[in-house]
Every structure is written in structure tokens, then in C-alpha cells.
Amino acid sequence: MCCWTPLSLSLPPYPLQIVDISVSRIAAWNSDVLPIYEPGLDKVVKTCRGKNLFFSTEVDQGIRDADIIFVAVNTPTKKVGLGAGRAADLTYWELAARRIASVAETPKVVVEKSTVPINTAEAISAVLHGAGKTRFDVLSNPEFLAEGTAMTDLDKPDRVLIGGNMNESGMAAVAKLADVYAHWVPRERILTTNVWSSELSKLVANSFLAQRVSSINAVSAICEASGADVDEVARAVGMDSRIGSKFLKASVGFGGSCFQKDILNLVYLCQSMGLADVAEYFHSVVMMNDRQKERFVSRMIHGLFNTVTGKRIALLGFAFKKDTGDTRESASIEICRRLIEERASVCIYDPKVEADQIWMDLTTATKLDKTEVQKYVTLCDSAYEAALGAHALAIATEWDEFKTLDYAKIQEDMVKPSFVFDGRNVLDHDALRALGYIVYAIGKPLDPKLNTSINC
Ligand code: UDX
């Protein structure tokens, strides 16, 4: 739970108190090693901490002192019960609301920062007013920042969206929050809407972005079958100003904590409203994403002479995108799970992801214990180490350092013929072929030396 406002490079004249029940997490925020990696975050925290930014486990005091309370708790997809696998689990939100209600003595503006299904503000308002003893105005203020560029996104957002009730006190609360953002965001970029529009806009924005990725990934399959080049198609299509060029990079599949979760949330919402065909439409975005990951693995298996059993594969990148240590829904997890299923030997290197996180992701995905997983998976300290004795390199995350590796040196220590499967289209494929590699790249004309007897 975070009382006040998101971090900004500018220093607005209000104290920002971040409170959390986790002692270890707050200790990490107060230490030199922050609990998450995000470019530029260290600098802001170190500049502001102790001045107008405080981290504490004194949750109740934080609630009492705040005028505006941002609730930024986790809202994962429900694992069990009604709506399992699709609906958002609002347990943490409800617990936070009950805590605020029981402690608050003066009127509060309570802001939804976590992505939530529509109508959550109304439900939370009912909890707050039912259990509390003061007035609460619940606002929706979805976060649009992306990992890896979070600090710039926060500092220069395309827009800030604030949804509130259209009554007098709701509109006053919206104005109060807008005034906070106006310290660093131009007024014309601060949009105010009713609460449902705001909640729905967040789900729709993520669904549209994910849909673009699934669309270009669907096109990548057509490109491979036809000889077209997906980057050329994306460029030609994206130059149409009505379409735009962003989010048209074909990949091994989108990951991250938001896209899949928010689409499934939208799907569940549509289903519960009786809009089965609309639900199916959005669900196809996730299905196409799953297919893309499987397609990549199939290309590897068929390319490597129809089996990867016992073969060493260097998997470069485990994060769901570059410049983050986050692995949630990362395509690498599914790729690895499939390679383990095929009894390959997988050597993983990622510059930022912690070893414990990889083991946790893989034991969860495979339902095997760590010792079993370790029969198939080794973690390495560099791309060079991962590639030692490997039959193939697979690029799953577009880390910049993968572009400048010494691929001639790497190949010397690989089994021949050596394969590269570029799941992010970040390498110089012609240069690799000149070195003797057999190269597969998403949505690119297929290498004549690659086994393509089966269309993927
Ligand atoms: C996303 C939204 O962009 C952000 O607005 C929202 O607040 C949270 O969810 P994030 O998940 O951090 O942000 O990353 P994003 O840059 O959107 O990428 C999501 C996934 O799509 C990554 O796996 C990325 O590699 C992939 N992607 C993105 C592509 O495969 N191709 C693209 O062209 C763009």
C-alpha cells in the first residue's frame, strides 16, 4: 500500500509514505540494494529517501496520516474457485480496504492503482463505508508505465487517467488528485472520466497492445511460410499513420505481469456479461501468444533434426523483456518447460534475473521439484559459459549485450553444425550465417539449411 503518489523525478512538496506489511521488503527499500531492478529507480530513491519519501511497516500510522491513499497491492489471476484462471483475485485489495476502514479517522481519498476489474471501485466503496467511520472517495487511477522505462513513463506520461464518481465529493476528490499530478504533468494530459470508463480503459489499453503483438506474431507465421520478412512488413504497415509503428516487433511471445492477466480479466468480464463472442475475440489474443511460444519450440526441435533429447541448448534471456529482472509470464518459462519435457539440457543465462526466481518459475511450471529440474537445467554466469558445448543458442530476451557477443568465439566451443534461434530478431543473421551458423529468426525467410519439413 502506498500513501500519497507515485515516485517522480521532481520533488513535489508533499511527503510520500510507502507502507507494506512485509518487514523484509521495507528493509530492502531502505537499504542500498532495492528489491527490484528498474533503470533510474536507484537514483530517485536515493535522492528522495528521508526527504519526502519514506518506507515503513507502520501501516496504520501511514493510513491515519494520509489524505490520499494509493492502493497498489497485487491482483493476480484467481487460481481456484469461481472464475479461476480468468478473473482477478481481489483478496489483497479487500484486505487493504478493510484495514483502511478500521483505522481511518478522517476523510480519505482512496485510489485504485492496481489493475482491477470494472466495478471494483463500487465494491471497495461498499467495504470502506460499511466497515469505516469516516467518508471515503474511491478513485480509479490506472498505471500505464512499462517495466524497463518506468521512470521516464512516470515522469512524462502520455496521459494520466483519473476516474471518479460524478457527485460533488467525487469530483472534488478527482480535482485533488489531478492537482497532485499537475506538479509535473501538463494539465491537458490529465484525463478525468467516470470511474467505470477509467477501470475499463486500463484493461482495453493492455488488450490492444497485446493484440498488436499477437497480430504481428500471427503475421510472422505467414512470413515464414511465404518468404516475406516480418520486419519489412511491420515497417510498411506501421508507416501508415493510422496504424503507427510501435508494438509491431515480432517475438517469441509477450510476457509480463499485465497483458495476459488483463486480457483474461476482460474475457471473464465479457463472459459474465453474456458477451460470449466478444470474450472469444479477446481470448484469441492469448491463444495466439501461446501458439507463438510453441511454434518457436517446434522450430528448434525440427531444426535440430527432430529431437532435442540430450542436446545442450543455451537459453539467452529469462526476463520477459530487456532491462528488467521480472520473469512473470516470461516466454522463457514456457520454452524451458517444453525443452525439459523433451529432455533437453538447458543452460540459462540472464544478466538480471536472480537464480532463486528461475528455480521457482521452473518448478512451478514443470510441477517437478528443484532436484528434478536441475537434471535438465543449469544456470550460467555468462552467455559464453551457457554456449560451451551447446548445439544451439536460443535468444528469448532482447538484452542489448546479446547483440555484441563474439559469435565467432562462441561457435568455436559449440557442437557443429551450430544453430541460432533468434526469438527476438536482434542479431545480425547474415553475419552469423557467414560464420557458419544455421539461423532461424522469427518471421524471416527460412534458412535453406534448416530442417523445415514440418510447417510451424
Ligand atoms: C505493459 C504496458 O505496456 C503498460 O502500459 C502497462 O502499464 C503494463 O503492461 P510491460 O508489461 O512492462 O508494460 O511491458 P511492454 O513493453 O508492454 O511489453 C510486454 C511484452 O510484450 C514483453 O514481453 C515484450 O517483449 C512484448 N512485446 C512488446 C513484443 O513482443 N513486441 C512488441 O512490439 C512490444
Image (cartoon, rainbow, N blue to C red):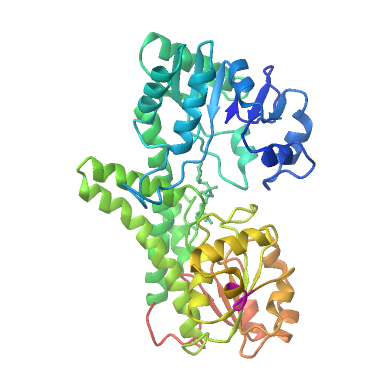
User: Which residue: 56% across, 67% down?
Assistant: 425
Looking at the image, residue 192 sits to the left or right of residue 397; the answer is: left
Indicate the position of residue 196 as horizontal and vertical percent values: 35, 28
Q: Nearer the viewer, residue 211 or 375?
A: 375
Q: What stretch is highlighted in magenta?
A: 373-377
For image coordinates 68% across by 38% down, the residue present is 23
**Left or right of residue 167, residue 305 in this image:** right
**Residue 31 x/y as whole percent:** 78, 39
Answer yes or no: is residue 21 visible.
yes
User: Could you tell whether 48 is left or right of 190 in the image?
Assistant: right
- Percent across and percent down for residue 446 are 47, 80
Q: Say if 379 sits above or below 281 in the image.
A: below
Image quadrant where residue 25 sits: top right
The answer to whether residue 120 is left or right of residue 383 is left
**Residue 438 in which image quadrant:** bottom right
Above-or-below relation of 115 to 69: below
Q: Which residue is drawn at 40% across and 64% down?
A: 290
Q: In this view, does 182 lie above or below 31?
A: above
Residue 112 visible to the viewer? no
Image quadrant where one finds the N terminus? top right
In this picture, is 297 found above or below 310?
Answer: above
Inspect the magenta stretch and tell me whether residue 218 lies in it.
no
Residue placed at 52% from the left, 76% from the top? 340
Quadrant, the C terminus = bottom left
Q: Position of residue 212 (x, y in %)?
A: 41, 53
Quadrant assignment, res 362 = bottom right
